[in-house]
Image (cartoon, rainbow, N blue to C red):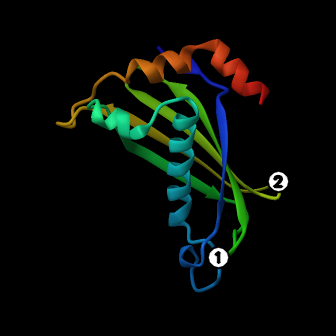
């Protein structure tokens, strides 16, 4: 059972000096860190703290991640990370990401997370994620923002 989602959240981050390479560009590995920030803040906005998920024995592990770079980001740029839930199954959640600077698209990415227990065995996503993801009123409210 999968649901297509229109749920999105935007968070801002300023590129720190330590995140750049010798050329002064945001190092490619940091986009993945920014994606994680976006996912965490999306959950938080929905009233779910990632810490609480882990404490309840639901661990979300990245099983796939990717990024396509279009334009560079530089030290001190203020970036907007748009995180969208694009698919939810019984065990997995797929996110799409867009990274903007002043409205200009710099990068696009995606990740797939699977829910596992403390022994690493797949388990169902917690009800709070699946129920919220399947609630059309939540999707409609977020789509209007």
The residue pinned by badge 1 equals 25
Q: Residue at x 21, y 37 (%)?
A: 120
Where residue 24 appears, x then y in whole percent?
65, 82
Location of mark 2 (residue): 103
Q: Is residue 2 visible?
A: no
Residue 123 as seen in the image, left or right of residue 138: left
- Residue at 62%, 45% in the rendered image: 97
Label located before the other in sequence (1 or 2): 1
* 10 Å crowding of disc 1: few (<14), some (14-19), many (20+): some
Q: Give residue 53's position: percent from left, percent from top.
A: 36, 33
Q: Looking at the image, which residue is at 59% across and 30% down? A: 86
User: Tag 2's secondary structure?
Assistant: loop
- Label 2: how many Cα within 10 Å (few below 14, some 14–19, many 20+): few
Q: Quadrant of residue 4?
A: top right
| The furthest residue to the bottom | 22
Please provide percent x and percent y for residue 99.
68, 54
Please tell me which residue is depicted at 50% across the width and 24% down the height of the picture: 88
Q: Are marks 1 and 2 in contact (CB under 8 Å)?
A: no
Q: Is residue 89 above or below residue 55?
A: above
């Amino acid at each position: 059972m999968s649901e297509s989602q229109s749920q999105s959240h935007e968070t801002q981050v300023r590129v720190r000096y330590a995140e750049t390479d010798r050329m002064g560009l945001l190092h490619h590995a940091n986009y993945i860190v920014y994606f994680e920030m976006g996912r965490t803040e999306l959950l938080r906005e929905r009233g779910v703290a990632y810490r609480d998920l882990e404490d309840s024995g639901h661990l979300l592990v990245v099983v796939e991640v990717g990024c396509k770079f279009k334009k560079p980001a530089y030290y001190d740029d203020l970036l907007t990370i748009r995180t969208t839930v694009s698919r939810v199954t019984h065990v997995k959640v797929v996110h799409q990401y867009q990274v903007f600077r002043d409205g200009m698209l710099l990068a696009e990415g995606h990740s797939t997370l699977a829910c596992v227990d403390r022994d690493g065995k797949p388990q169902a996503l917690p009800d709070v994620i699946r129920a919220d993801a399947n609630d059309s009123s939540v999707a409609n409210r977020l789509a209007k923002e």
